[in-house]
Amino acid sequence: MDAHPQPFYEGTKVQWAWDSTSLGWLKECPRKYQYHMIEQWRGRGESIHLEYGILYHAALEEYDRMKLEGGMSHDDAVRWVVRELLTKTWRDGLPWRGAKDLPADDKASLKSRENLVRTVVWYLNKFKDDPAKTLMHPVTGKPMVELHFQFEIEGGYSLCGYLDRVVEFQEQPFVMDRKTTTSTLGSYYFEQFDPDNQMSVYTVASQVAFHTPVKGVIVDAAQIAVGFSRFVRSFVFKTADQIDEWMKDLYVYLEQARGYAERGYWPQNDKSCHKYGGCAFREICSKSPQVREKFLETHFQREPWNPLVPR
Amino acid sequence: MSTELSELFDRDPLHLSDQDLDVIVQYQREHQTQHELGVKAAPAPKAKRPSKTQDLLKELGLASSGDLLKDLGLK
């Protein structure tokens, strides 16, 4: 039995604890939200993206902690992080296969163990003297990395999640959000973050939970490609009025989610199926309703997403 | 990836020494430097595929467009 607190009101499908991921699913398509959040279906490629992201984030967080808290030199911290990465990706006496079993045309196929190590070493080498400095928490005195937040908003709801890093850049505080992608890091890639649900959640969180009035978010993206990794940073600025508007919209979405849960029906948004490279459930939704369950069981696995569980 | 590096990746991380890890890190740093300098492995030579025009000419019993031009007195 899952001992963690649940994000739904007991005995209902009404979600009270929301993170940017579950909110993003809801906004994209209520049916996508149903499959992911309510029924906990996850595609194999998605699981690899998720695990790869968690390992990448953990490695960079570990580096920051080793340097800022542990007083390690750059080279010692890099060595430490590589050892940690190799250990975490050593499963049952064998190297983590990651994306090795996926077809080469699957976007996740580049996310391998070797490419993960390469990406982390290259990142730390490129940002050895990072102009964005990690801020220290005003109360705990610890580096502001992988910060869990959870705070109540109106209507009995809570917003929760993690901030990758809070930094000072050119004497201004920013949230830094790390991304890994197999897409090319051009303007097309960065345009998807402005406006974006996640960037707004992070800006609100830094202000409410950590009393750090950030100017916005720095998207710190890593492209994983064949033979190389590449890093580009971009800014998303948020004004107070934009945040107010986002909060106003949020309550509308949360009430919609409550309505779907009370009716026990989450409609398809069939204008979203082909966006963002195509929804993972596009194939499922294209089938007749009576056979969808069978296809889900064949092609997906159940992995709960709980915004209240520390990652 | 070199054989030495592959062997290190395939080894139980508990048996990797600091020197082994330095080999991995050093390899990646050199790889990054080479990439930034634009050094890439030479691509394998591609077999030249005859163009559609050449295929068509062959089907018509003409060896190449050069022959066609010759036949037409234009070359």
Image: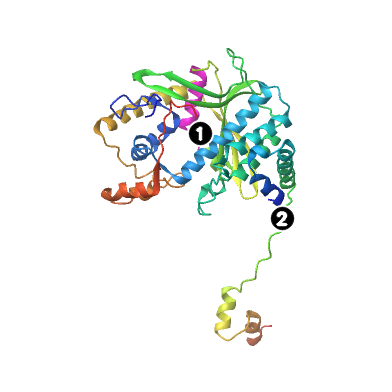
x and y percentages locating residue B23 in the rendered image? 74, 42
Tell me, for residue B41, which label it has, or none. 2
Tell me, for residue A194, which label it has, or none. 1
Q: Left of A213 or right of it: where is A255?
A: left
What is the C-alpha distance between the residues marked 2 and 1? 38 Å
Q: State whether the magenta stretch is mostly helix, strand or loop.
A: helix
Viewer-proximal residue among A233 and A3 = A3
* Residue B5 shows in the view: yes
- Region in magenta: A192-208
Viewer-proximal residue among A256 and A263 = A263
x and y percentages locating residue A280 in the rendered image? 41, 45
Residue that sits furthest to the top in the current view:
A139
Residue B10 to residue A127: above or below: below
Residue A6 to residue A288: above or below: above
Q: Left of A295 or right of it: where is B73?
A: right
Name the amino acid type tagged 1: Asp
